Image (cartoon, rainbow, N blue to C red):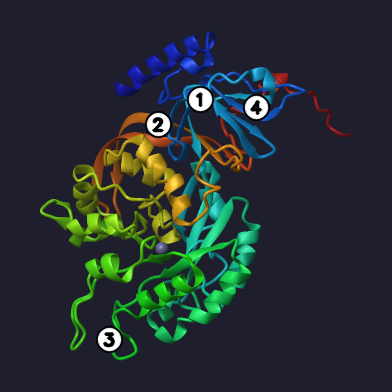
Amino acid sequence: MKRRKFIGRTLAGGAVAGAGLSSIEPGSALAYSRRKEVVIREQGKYDILLKGGHVIDPGNNINSPMDVAITEGKIAVVGKNLPANDAKRTIDVSGLYVSPGFIDIHIHAFYTFKFEYYNYRWIIPDDFSFPYGVTTNVDAGSSGVYNFDKFKEIIDSSVSRLLAFINISAPGMDANENEPATFKIALIQQKIRKYQDLIVGIKTAHYGPGIPYDDIHTPWASVDAAVRAGELAGLPVMFDYSARPAQGKWPERTYRELILEHGRPGDIHTHFLSKTPYVENGKPSEDLYKARDRGFIFDLGHGGGSFRWEVAVPVVMEGKFYPDSISTDLHSHNTSNGKVLNMANVMSKCLALRMPLEEVIRCSTVNPAREINRPELGSMKVGNTADIAVFEVLNKEIDYIDARGGKMSGDKEIHNIMTLFGGEVAFDPWGLNALFWQNMPVRRRRG
Ligand SMILES: [Zn+2]
């Protein structure tokens, strides 16, 4: 019944469209099928004008109907009622949301390499980028100093932007993450200098489970080495970290120590919505607030085992402690079984947690850009690269699973419609930027 009501609204909106493009309310299901075709002109000071959409750009405090003009791959103007005559291509995006392209700071894309220990099969990032509004991905430590040059080949072959956290362990993500002898702090500095436009931070992961502590394998060896490397490079560290009980002379290793003592302001705890100690008496723990006050960052990092409703509901939904950033932790062992589908899917799960849409966009654009020190990304500031997601929010009864397979009911789904990358239309399956086929120039077949 909901959908029927919805389509009614859409049709009403469509009727209004002839009078004024900006009057369609965003969120209308199937609104995109009511577009006019793209208007093409010979001359115009803008290359592309996105007309009639509802802009959500938390980095610039915009959440209202606005047009977006693009020139030479960059944002030229964001403003109300920009004249269509000023653009070479005017694309009708009425009824749709327009936001900066999404930034996913936790994926695994080192897909040419065979890792015996984790037996991961990595993803091809382009397959999960433009179709879901993502324009920038960050690989989270799949490679280390021994193989970052190899990973660079994948970065170079990617169409969407691919950046990286480099693993503190030189061979990257494998059993050696447990071996302090592989933590090559000096070599990492060299690699960061060589690839300073690509490496955005240091990653440490999977340190501890299954190995006993000794004088070399100390409880904090991995975290402290990564922080040292981060200090020397002036870059943040992303922690995939678990608490561990006391062993012999070694005391318990807690979350509190990570987020209040060992981690620095600007360092990032990914997977935090899977950690039950962050729930106290059905609410977010005091430690979470204290850590946020000192500038420590909390990233969602859904993954195959790292997002649990039993933590996310009391922390986010009732406690209103939102993640700083939303990320997927995509690898083939969670995409192939459906635990995570893509960035838009994880963002939709956050809507099910009653995060306002503007906050979900903030956590997928300007916040992750800030976390990786890329202010030129994640907002539609004039002069920024024109990476843009055009999407709708479908109102529908829909259930979502967490990483344990438990489900929760939601009533919204983010559905990406069109993606622009560097000012070019990079994804447009419904033809917002297209002419109807009858109007296309005739092209004769040779022969
Ligand atoms: Zn990961």
Q: Disc 4 to disc 3, how far (Cα)?
A: 61 Å
Which badge, 4 or 3, comes first in the chain's sequence?
3
Q: What is the quadrant of the N terminus in the image?
A: top left
Give the residue at the far front of this rendering: 294
Q: Position of residue 267 (x, y in %)?
A: 38, 63
Element under disc 1: loop
Q: Secondary structure at mark 3?
A: loop
Read off the residue under disc 1.
66
Residue nearest the observer in this picture, 342 or 167: 167
Task: Please name the amino acid that badge 4 sits on.
Answer: Ala
Given this view, does label 3 or label 1 mark the residue nearer the observer?
1
Which residue corresponds to mark 2? 393
Residue with the mark numbered 4: 434
Disc 3 or 1, which lies upstream in sequence?
1
Tell which quarter ligand 1 is in.
Answer: bottom left
For image coordinates 45% across by 70% down, the residue present is 230
Spatial separation of the CA atoms under disc 3 and disc 1: 57 Å
Q: Earlier in the sequence, mark 1 or mark 2?
A: 1
On screen, 210 above or below 351?
Answer: below
Q: Assign the C terminus to one quadrant of the image.
A: top right
The residue at label 4 has a CB less than 8 Å from ligand 1? no
Q: Position of residue 9 (x, y in %)?
A: 39, 15
Give the structural element (helix, strand or loop) at label 2.
strand
In the image, is the residue at mark 2 within 8 Å of ligand 1 by its beta carbon?
no
Dot 2 amino acid type? Val
Report the residue at 66% width, 40% height from top: 73
Q: Nearer the viewer, mark 3 or mark 2?
A: 3
